[in-house]
Structure formats: structure tokens, C-alpha cells
Amino acid sequence: MIKLINLSKSYHSGKIQAIINVTAHIKPGEFVSIVGQSGSGKSTIVKLIIAEERPDSGKIIIGGWDIIGIKEREIPTLRRQLGVIFQDFKLLPKKTVFENVAFAMQTCGFRPKEIKKIVDQMLSLVGLKGKENRYPHQLSGGEQQRVAIARSLVHKPKLLIADEPTGNLDSINTREIIDLLKKINNMGTTVVLVTHNKDVVNGLHSRVITLDSGQIISDQEDGRYLL
Ligand SMILES: Nc1ncnc2c1ncn2[C@@H]1O[C@H](COP(=O)(O)OP(=O)(O)OP(=O)(O)O)[C@@H](O)[C@H]1O
Ligand SMILES: [Mg+2]
């Protein structure tokens, strides 16, 4: 699904080495957590995978596509194959729940009937039926993250990448969002979860990659939070 091969990335013309020689293969259907101290390079890996940043060296292969030489005009095609969610939800504040989820399909030119069908499906999946007409500020943090998850799934991506998705949530909402990610994973989507949350990682009993100063120091099935 994803192959990162000898990947390195620096910022400020090489003064900050964010990622150093990282190699990891993530197989279809896996649920992988990436953990590490603040500044260890977790978000940099996410940005490299979604082609928001380019590596200095190494390879990134996503579903057989070597994205190292990806052209600007090909980035939307890549992004449609990846669902991405963030700590701060990144919802459009002046659009309703329905409109936030529908937006990516509208810009791709889907017909309204098809959009309604898919958006309804996704809002049912994340447990938000009946809240279509609310605005983001009328939702709890957990509900806002559910909208972001629904939005990330409209193109039926094979891979969902979550960078600290529960960073702004309390423990109950955290549990619910992680359960939702597990459900999505059980339906066949590969999930990459970046998190600081020790309880979340230890409760997952799945693969854990630990970064330290830009390098992988541990990569274990049924891994533990080591930091
Ligand atoms: N745009 C940038 N310009 C310069 N340096 C950057 C940039 N983005 C990240 N860095 C640096 O690269 C290193 C890795 O940052 P990264 O954001 O990947 O860490 P992280 O593990 O996601 O941290 P956190 O847990 O705080 O989110 C850090 O030293 C950071 O200061
Ligand atoms: Mg980060």
C-alpha cells in the first residue's frame, strides 16, 4: 500500500533534519500507529505521503505509484486516493455538515443525486444522520472530527491518514473516534494513525512505529507505546 524507502527530508536548506533514512512498508488493510516525541518527524512523514512536502532523497510508493516525481497537476488525483484528517478538523465554517462532506464531490462534478447518496452513506457511517444542516460551530469536537472523517471517505480511499485526530478531544470522544477508525479499517481501509496518546496506542494491539529525532527506533506488531 505504502512503501517508504530510505526517505530523508530536511528543512531550512538542510539545517533541520526532520526525517533521516526512514524505511517502512505498510500493507493493505493494516492499522499502523506512528508515535514519537514532539518534533520527531511524524507530521513530516504525513506531509511527504500526501505530497505536501517533497523528500530530499528516497522513494515513496503509494498503491504502486512512485510519487517522488509527482507533478503539481497530478496531486489532486493522489489526494483523492487518500483520506486525510487532522487535529483541527479543517472544516469550512460557513458550510453545513452536508455541504462540508459534499464539497469535494461537487468540485469533481458529481451529479447532485449521486452526491446525496454518498454523503448520506458517509454520515450514517460516522453516526451523524440528522445533523446534516448544522454548522461546525453547532457541533461538539468529536462530532466535528466525525464530519472530517465522513468528508475524507467520499472518494472511497484505500488509505486513511490521521495526524493527531484526537489531539483536541476528551477521553470519551477520543475513544469514539478511535472506534470509528477501527470500524473503517475493518471495512478494508488501511489506516495510518499519528498520535501522542499512550492509552490509544496500547489499546489498539496493532503495529506501532516509533520515531526519535527523525529515525525509526522501533517497528512492532502488537506494539506498545515506548516513550
Ligand atoms: N515547515 C517547516 N520548516 C522548518 N522546520 C520544520 C517545518 N516543519 C517541521 N519542521 C521541523 O522538523 C522537525 C519535525 O517536525 P514534525 O512536524 O514532523 O514533528 P512531529 O513529530 O509531527 O511533532 P508534533 O508531535 O509536535 O506534531 C522538527 O524539528 C520541526 O521543527
Ligand atoms: Mg505533528
Image: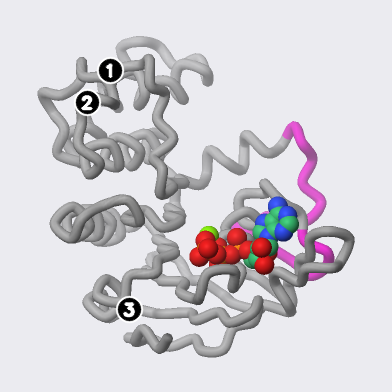
Q: Taking 140 as reference, is 223 above or below it?
A: below
User: Viewed as shown, does residue 62 lie left or right of 196?
Assistant: right
Name the residue located 53 percent from the left edge and 38 percent from the top edge. 80
Q: Tag 2, which secondary structure?
A: helix
Q: Are marks 2 and 1 in contact (CB under 8 Å)?
A: yes
Looking at the image, do the residues carrying marks 2 and 3 touch, with CB atoms under 8 Å apart? no
Q: Which residue is mark 3?
A: 206
Question: Magenta span has 57?
Answer: yes
The residue shown at (40%, 61%) is 191
Q: CA distance from mark 3 to mark 1?
A: 35 Å
Q: Residue furthest right?
A: 13
| First reached walking from the N terminus: tag 2 or tag 3 | 2
Q: Where does the magenta region start and end?
A: 55-73
x then y, percent, for residue 32? 41, 71
Q: Circle 1 sits on which residue?
A: 116
Report how far apart the C-alphas of labels 2 and 3 lie in the structure: 31 Å
Residue linked to disc 2:
120
Asked whether residue 1 is in view, the answer is no
- C-alpha gap between disc 2 and disc 1: 6 Å
| Residue closer to the observer: 154 or 164 | 164
